[in-house]
Image (cartoon, rainbow, N blue to C red):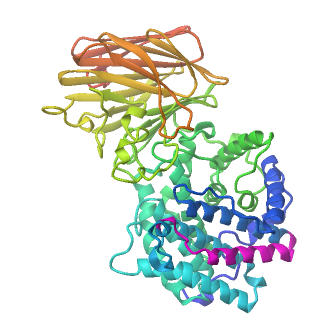
Amino acid sequence: MSAASFAPHPRLYLGTEELDRLRAEPRTPFLKLAAWQIIADADRFVDMPPLTYARNVHNEHLIRARETQTRMLSLLARWVQTGEARFRDAALAHVEMMDAWEYWSWITWRRDDPDPNAIFDLSYGENSATLALAYDLLYDDLSENERATMVDIARRRALGPFVHHVDNDNPPSWYGGTNNWNAVCAGGAGVLALAMREDLPEARRALELAEGSMPAFVEEAERSDGGWSEGVGYWAYGMMYAFRYLTSHERATGSAHPLMRKRCMRETLRFPLDFSPAGIACGFGDSNSWRPAPFHYAAAERFALPDVMANLDGHLDRITQRLASGGAAPNPAEWLALHPGEAQPGSARASRPTVNLYRGLDWAKLEDSCAEPALHMTVRGGTSEVPHGHRDLLSFHCVVGEERLIENVGVGEYLDTTFSNRREELFEVGPASKNTLLVNGVGITVGSALDRTERVSVDGAEGVRMVATSAMGEMRDGPAATFCGRLVLLLPERAFLIVDQAILPRAGRIESRMFSSADVDAFTATALLKGHSERMRVAYACSVPALLTAATTAPTTPTQAPHTMLRWCTRAQQTRMAMATLLVPGRAAASVSIASDGKRLSVHVEGKGWRRDVALTQQLKPRRT
């Protein structure tokens, strides 16, 4: 496309309509908080106070880039709202500050290599986007010298290094990759190339290179039914830059981007909502965190998905309630610009399947929201051989109402071991910290995958069946198990039933682990989990003698609160063992029993006013009667 056919500035994802929203009177409680936040922040940032990002931590230069981008967005928003030169001048001063940084990258800082061409990493991608927004939104009010200065900075510090690293026979591993680095690096450079398309010769080649990298990122979502193997935290990070780039491309060129025509780009907007019930991240891997983001809402509006918008509005209501006692609204400038101003009615929320399995990813969500408190469980199938993955196959999270009562133990901070060849030694990465099965004291092997993950229906109960036989690997003189599997069912009586079966070639021991940050009362074969407002009764059973013990974790990060570990273990070594775990909301008594005749499994569960029998084969399949 010729430069002449590009849209005038502002041409990126914050265009004329978004700037009009910035100037409009905020109408929802959250947007009012965001508006107040921008005023307070911009008034502080005008004076260029020192940056407050954490020092001596993993990737501190990336944290610096994010703080600077937040400042830039606040200053630009107030410039748009007021036209006061002090905000414009402060924005340009922040650009000069960025250029004055000796190192843009934490990686090259550690190498003591200040050459701007030494790398193009996440910090470069984020800083590129910050430069792009400043150039695009200030363009009509910049002098020729100011434009030339910004173009020069972009050439030396951003697009020049991008082209230098990518435009050769050995591009960096993230180029054309399937993880967040692709979207952030290529997307950030691509947004800057769109902003400076006519003014910087490198921008044209940079745009071609960004276009060549982005399809692989989108194809990863396509392979996973819209899911994301890096988890909800990195979904939010990567997708933010992907959508920033793709929507900016559409604005600048005036035509729909081919990648935005793919169904997965619509479906992926529901993925973090499925795995963050009540706004509580229940995904898997390194960055298990999530909160609603402006780009998510804008993408839902772009695709006309009122159910996603209504869901996000519900999460914004929760944030507003938490901020009532103080605190800062997240991403205030982009929320004001990208939210239409009126919340979607609650009735717009679509009814989602009770059990939803993301094929290709093999993560599942089980949900019962028909009564209070709502019940949610997320289950981890698939493979552990993914970016930022843990050895957490077969594991799960459980939320009752708005409290997560059962959770995997997650990573508290990134250390120099986190992304090294000693990663697997970290407690929070391995199966010993997960709500999963251990065979002879160990869980799944490094780089393993489940043999099967599938939806099942058993006597009116819906759920997921997982087979992990090969994932358990080898032991002393052969395979660890001849069969190892887990069945997770959502019962119509509003309870979860987990059935585990292990058949071993030699006598051994199995253990079902579960972790909770709630208060825990443990008894002989039951436990009561006590959150701030919700309760959950846990009942255990085993086909051979077993015992329940409790322990306290010792987090790698000592400032991280420990969890209570519940261990349901066989008392002696056996070759054939079946376990059942019943999870029922509330404090009322509940019970479960399980029996095996060597060919069949019979499970009996009881709760307050109800009982149910579940008939299974030894492979945890529904038994034909």
Viewer-proximal residue among 30 and 286: 286
In the image, which residues are magenta? 82-107
Position of residue 60 measured from the top left corner of the image (x, y, whole percent): 56, 60
Q: Is residue 259 visible in this depiction of the protein?
A: no
Q: Is residue 501 visible in this depiction of the protein?
A: yes
Residue at image position (82%, 57%) is 35
Q: Is residue 50 magenta?
A: no
Residue at image position (83%, 58%) is 40
Q: Is residue 99 magenta?
A: yes
Position of residue 489 measured from the top left corner of the image (x, y, whole percent): 43, 25
- Provide the major secondary structure of the magenta segment: helix
Answer above or below: position of 136 versus 285.
below
Viewer-proximal residue among 162 and 397: 162
Left or right: residue 301 compared with residue 542: right
Identify the image quadrant of residue 150: bottom right
Residue at image position (37%, 53%) is 420
Position of residue 339 measured from the top left corner of the image (x, y, whole percent): 73, 57
